[in-house]
Image: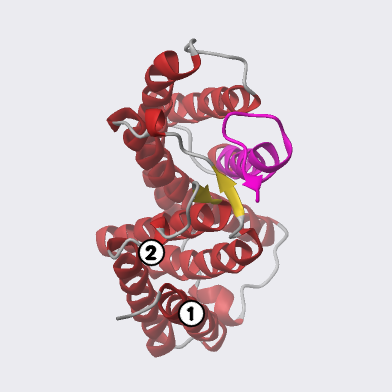
Amino acid sequence: MISPEVSTLVTLILYALASIAGIAGMVARSLFWRRLGCWLALAGFACQTLMLALGFHTSLPGGLSLGAYLQMLAWFVLLCGLAVWFKMRQETALLFAAPLGLILFAMSAPYLSALIHVPPSLKAPFYALHIGALFLSLGLTALAFAAGALFLFLEGRIKSKQRMRGFWQDMPALSILDKINAFTTLTAFPLYTLGIVAGLIWAKPVFGATVTGDPKEVVSIVVWLLFAVLFHNRLANGWKGRKPARLAVFIFVLCLFSIIVVNTFMVTHHAFIRR
């Protein structure tokens, strides 16, 4: 039987190879290497999916490890990258998702002993809905960040009249990056809302109040408000280009702050506890 260690190592190698092939394909302007990077990313995703299906993520007693949390986030990032690849026929999102998944996997290694305890009272349908919706939303937000950051960088080069030589010529048009940003953010906001609402409903019987003033709750509400501004202006005011790109980048950075700083260093119901 495949062990968790072997499955994790194979997944990590496939994500690394996908990242190398994708970057090489962009630098060398090679369609073959870009496509190979996408298929290697798909293989890594399938390997990680097998790992999740076999329940390797539940092998640590006492709770969910921060390492497993980061690996799950990597899975959702790759899932969203694959969805954009299949739906919009754009390789760029997946080629950015693979290195991000690799980074998350690499970051997970030192934190396999940092646990977030999940009492039996929290193992309820609303808890699963809360976690699932937020993870999928974060995966989409990561791709919105990548599309927004690349949009801002390329727009800066164009406005400064720098020549788009070499692999820069193969980058998606600004309009395509804006569409990826729009698709991911408009999909992520309802999922984020669903996750927040499920968390608030689930918190009432567990913590005795819907809103407790927990730092994680405060940051999450701020993220939701910013998401709401982006969502509203995309739909109602036809926001395009630089403004939504900047806001998408800031929202993702704030999400990372919530995961890394709030969960690890602050007193919160969501804190990771190192054994």
Total marks drawn? 2
Residue reaching furthest top? 209
Please indicate, yes or no, whether residue 182 appears anywhere in the rendered image.
no
- If you read the primary sequence from the N terminus, does the residue marked by circle 1 or circle 2 appear first? 1
Position of residue 269 relative to residue 47, above or below, is above
Q: Which quadrant: the N terminus? A: bottom left
**Which residue is drawn at the image coordinates 57% and 34% (left, top)?**
270
Position of residue 272 relative to residue 68, above or below, is above
Residue identifier under label 2: 56
**Which residue is drawn at the image coordinates 38% and 46% (left, top)?**
136
Depth check: give the residue in front, 77 or 69: 69
Q: CA distance from mark 1 to mark 2?
A: 13 Å
Name the amino acid, label 1: Leu
What stretch of residues is rendered in magenta?
A: 246-275
Local crowd at mark 2 within 10 Å, few (<14), some, or many (≥20)?
some
Residue identifier under label 1: 9
Position of residue 7 relative to residue 89, above or below, is below
Query: Of helix, strand and loop, which one carries label 2?
Result: helix
Local crowd at mark 1 within 10 Å, few (<14), some, or many (≥20)?
some
Lateral position of residue 103 relative to residue 56, left or right: right
**Percent position of residue 133, x then y:** 36, 38
Please indicate, yes or no, whether residue 126 appears anywhere in the rendered image.
yes
**Which residue is drawn at the image coordinates 66% and 72% (left, top)?**
163
Q: Is residue 109 magenta?
A: no
Lateral position of residue 35 relative to residue 16, left or right: left
Examine the residues drawn in magenta and state their main secondary structure: helix
Mark number for residue 144? none
Pair 1/2: label in front:
2
Name the amino acid, label 2: Phe
